[in-house]
Every structure is written in C-alpha cells, then in structure tokens.
Image (cartoon, rainbow, N blue to C red):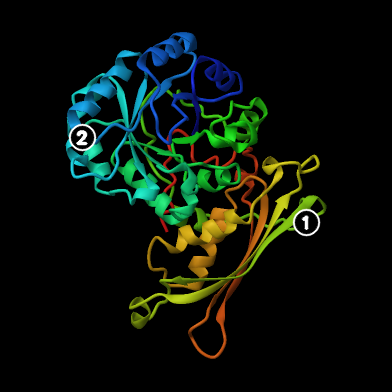
C-alpha cells in the first residue's frame, strides 16, 4: 500500500496533517521550490509531533558540494527527523554528494530526491542503494513548470518505481500532484505519495493547509497497514499475466441497474505486437476501444472521490504496452482488462484491440471480462498492492 506524505511548514500545520490522517509529516520551506526549514524549527516540530508520526525534513537547495550537503543533512538528523530528503540536482558532483552521505545513512533514513523536470539520472538509484539510502523520490524542481505528469508519462514513472523497488529502496512520488493524479499513481503502488499544493487553500502551495483538502486526499489513498517508520520497502511483485489468466466470473446481470459506463474511444498507440518475425522489427499502430462498467457512487458526485477517471483506462493501456513485445492481440486485451478490473468499483470491462497495419482495414479481438468473485469481496483500492506485494506490471 501507499503512505500519504503531507509537506508542512511547522508545528501548526503538522497538527492539521496528523489530525486529518497524513502518514508522514514532511517539513519544508514553501517560500522556495525545495527549501529547508531551520534545524531549530525541525526540532520543535519533531518534539510537538512526539512520535505520533514519522517526520521527514528537506535538505533544500544548497550548492551541490559534498561537504556542505553532508553538513546540512546531518543538522536535520540531529534535529530528530526520521527521514532526511536530499535534493540531488544535475551537477558534476552529484555522485560525490551521494557518496558523501553514506556514513550518515547509518543513523538516519536518507531519501534521495531527483527531479522530473531536470532529466533525472536513472543510474543514480543504484548509487543511492550502494550508499545506504532508504529510498528514492521523484519530484519537480520548478513548481511553476507543471506537475509530475507534465514531465513523465505513466510508463516512465512506473519504471522509476520499479527501479527503486528492485534495489530495496522505498519509492516516492511527488511534484505538484493534484487529486485526479492519485488513482493513476496508485496503480503503480509507490511507497509514498507526497503532497503540498493539493492540501492547501485554493491549490496555492504557499497558503496554509486546508483541513477539507487534506481529507479529500486522505480519502483517495487507502490506509496502509504497515508502520510508516519502518523504512522497509515492500517486497515481491504481482504478475498481471497470471492475473489475466486466472479466470473471471460471468454474472453480467449483477449490478446492472447500479452501474455507470466509462469509455475510451479510438485510442491509438504504437505497440510491439505480433507473432510474425517481421512484426518484431518495429512497433505498429493499435487502436483500443474500452468500455468499463463501474458501480454507481452511493451519493451525488461532488469531487474526485466519487469518480472513476478515464485516465485509469488509458494509463492501463500505456503500462501494458510499455513492458515487452506481446505476440497476440488476445493477450494484450486480456492484460488490459485484468489491470482495469483491479479497481474495486469496476464490475466489467469490454476491451477491443485492433491492429491497423495488417491490410486495408483493422483486425483484432473484443473481449468482455467481469470481476472475479474473490476480488469483488475486497473493498480497498488496488488490494493486491499490500505490504508484501510490489505491483510491477509484468506483462
């Protein structure tokens, strides 16, 4: 499951975050993009939180100089932070900065933060692991340059999560996240989702935390049964090939009167697909048409909490086709359907897949799949992404 991290400016906001369900309190100076609070404020907040939640603290925007970064991180550790988030900007000394923190990693959980709008260095994740870091996080450096999805697509974000997980690191995602982003990112089951803007009045990250906004974000993230201060990444993974192959229940009349229909039409993407040898040489265009039946909310829809977004459909398609060459359109359709059916409100998925480059017309398959009975009994969002599962979309 996924922890909710709330970035706060001090004691008062930390109390709001705790009362309204945040799993991790994250200290940050919001007057700059990735600014650090003073160590004295960090200590005061740690004391006020009194171990009710783990506290993380940002090491802000120092020069990428190893000794200076190590001193700044040590000061936050000395202030009592459970996690120290270190911003790793593109610089010739970036690797040296990571290595300089290795001794500190023995007494505090270090989170290395790279930035989607600065073309993050994928090799840095391995170096973090070698240097004893507890986790890796992707964020945005320039908050006015857009949110995470403006710089990375769902497949690239998923690769970041998987790269961290395979090296035993916690995987965190942040970057001006908005509430519609949450269900999409939960599909990847990151260990942490970090928020500031979405928690503030008027979506202004420099404004005060708004309790109602915190409630909305909290309601979109199922509570994690793990303790947030363990510092241990989840292990294991789910193979959606097995999910797609294990069978479905067929009860098309069930919930019929209570369902809404969400659809995606004529969604075309290049995919590596086909059983012939020549089809492995390059991707070919594939058209997807998907209809999803979802349980109707029990009250009038007023915000994102009552919505099943079409983004979940298009993200599922992108995630499946990003992984590997798929020989058959039937296999592709099954995997897309299986991924969509993981959402607890989905009762059925109709997936039509057409190869568009096999002749003058299209050729493909349409399947209809219903939620498996044993899955329908689970009420959490993405239940299989629990404390001992790492939901790589292994297609």
Depicted 344 relative to depicted 19: above or below: below
How many numbered discs, if any?
Answer: 2
Q: Residue furthest right?
A: 257
Q: Secondary structure at mark 2?
A: helix
**Residue placed at 47% from the left, 48% from the top?**
145
Q: Quadrant of residue 95?
A: top left
Earlier residue among tags 1 and 2: 2
Coordinates of residue 376 in the picture (x, y in percent): 64, 44
Badge 1 density bin: few <14, some 14–19, many ≥20, Cα 10 Å = few
| Front in this rendered view, residue 75 or 242 | 75
144 is higher (above) or lower (below) than 170: below
Tell which of 168 and 54 is nearer to you.
54
Q: Which residue is mark 1?
A: 253
Q: Which secondary structure lies at badge 1?
A: loop
The C terminus sits in image quarter = bottom left
Residue ranking furthest to the front: 31
34 lies left or right of 255: left
Residue drawn at point x = 61 percent, y = 29 percent? 214
Answer left or right for 373 relative to 331: right
Q: Which residue is mark 2?
A: 97
The reply to whether residue 70 is visible in this rendering is: yes
Seen from the viewer's position, the closer of residues 120 and 376 is: 120
Q: Which mark is residue 240?
A: none
x and y percent of residue 130 in the render? 20, 36
Image x and y of residue 331, in percent: 49, 67
Rounded to the nearest angstrom, the CA distance separating label 1 from label 2 is 60 Å
Mark 1 or 2: the one toward you? 2
Q: Position of residue 33 (x, y in %)?
A: 43, 36
Q: Residues within 10 Å of mark 2 (few under 14, many from 20)?
A: many
Q: Residue at x 40, y 75 (%)?
A: 283
- Position of 33 with respect to 4 (left or right) is left
Give the vertical position of 189 relative to 294 (above or below).
above
């Amino acid at each position: 499951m996924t922890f909710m991290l709330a970035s706060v400016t001090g004691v008062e906001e930390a109390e709001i975050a705790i009362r309204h369900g945040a799993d991790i309190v994250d200290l940050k100076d919001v007057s700059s993009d990735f600014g650090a609070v003073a160590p004295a404020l960090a200590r005061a907040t740690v004391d006020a939180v009194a171990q009710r939640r783990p506290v993380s603290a940002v090491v802000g925007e120092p020069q990428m100089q190893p000794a200076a970064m190590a001193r700044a991180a040590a000061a936050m550790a000395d202030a009592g932070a459970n996690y120290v988030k270190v911003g790793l900007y593109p610089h010739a000394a970036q690797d040296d900065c990571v290595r300089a923190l290795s001794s500190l990693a023995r007494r505090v959980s270090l989170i290395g933060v790279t930035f989607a709008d600065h073309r993050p260095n994928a090799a840095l994740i391995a170096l973090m692991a070698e240097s004893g870091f507890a986790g890796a996080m992707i964020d945005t450096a320039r908050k006015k340059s857009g949110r995470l999805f403006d710089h990375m697509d769902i497949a690239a974000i998923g690769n970041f999560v998987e790269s961290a997980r395979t090296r035993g690191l916690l995987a965190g995602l942040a970057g001006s996240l908005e509430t519609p982003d949450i269900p999409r990112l939960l599909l990847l089951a990151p260990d942490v989702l970090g928020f500031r803007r979405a928690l503030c009045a008027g979506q202004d990250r420099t404004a005060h935390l708004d309790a109602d906004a915190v409630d909305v974000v909290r309601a979109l993230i199922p509570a994690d049964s793990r303790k947030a201060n363990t510092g241990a990444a989840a292990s294991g993974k789910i193979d959606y090939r097995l999910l797609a192959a294990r069978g479905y229940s067929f009860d098309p009349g069930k919930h019929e009167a209570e369902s809404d229909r969400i659809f995606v039409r004529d969604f075309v993407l290049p995919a590596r697909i086909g059983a012939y040898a020549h089809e492995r040489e390059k991707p070919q265009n594939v058209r997807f048409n998907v209809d999803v039946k979802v349980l109707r909310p029990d009250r009038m829809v007023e915000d994102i909490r009552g919505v099943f977004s079409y983004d979940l459909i298009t993200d599922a398609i992108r995630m499946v086709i990003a992984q590997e060459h798929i020989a058959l359109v039937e296999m592709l359709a099954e995997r897309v359907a299986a991924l969509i059916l993981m959402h607890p409100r989905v009762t059925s998925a109709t997936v039509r897949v057409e190869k568009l480059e096999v002749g003058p017309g299209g050729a493909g398959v349409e399947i209809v799949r219903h939620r498996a009975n044993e899955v329908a009994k689970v009420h959490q969002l993405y239940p299989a992404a629990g404390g001992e599962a790492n939901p790589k979309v292994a297609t």
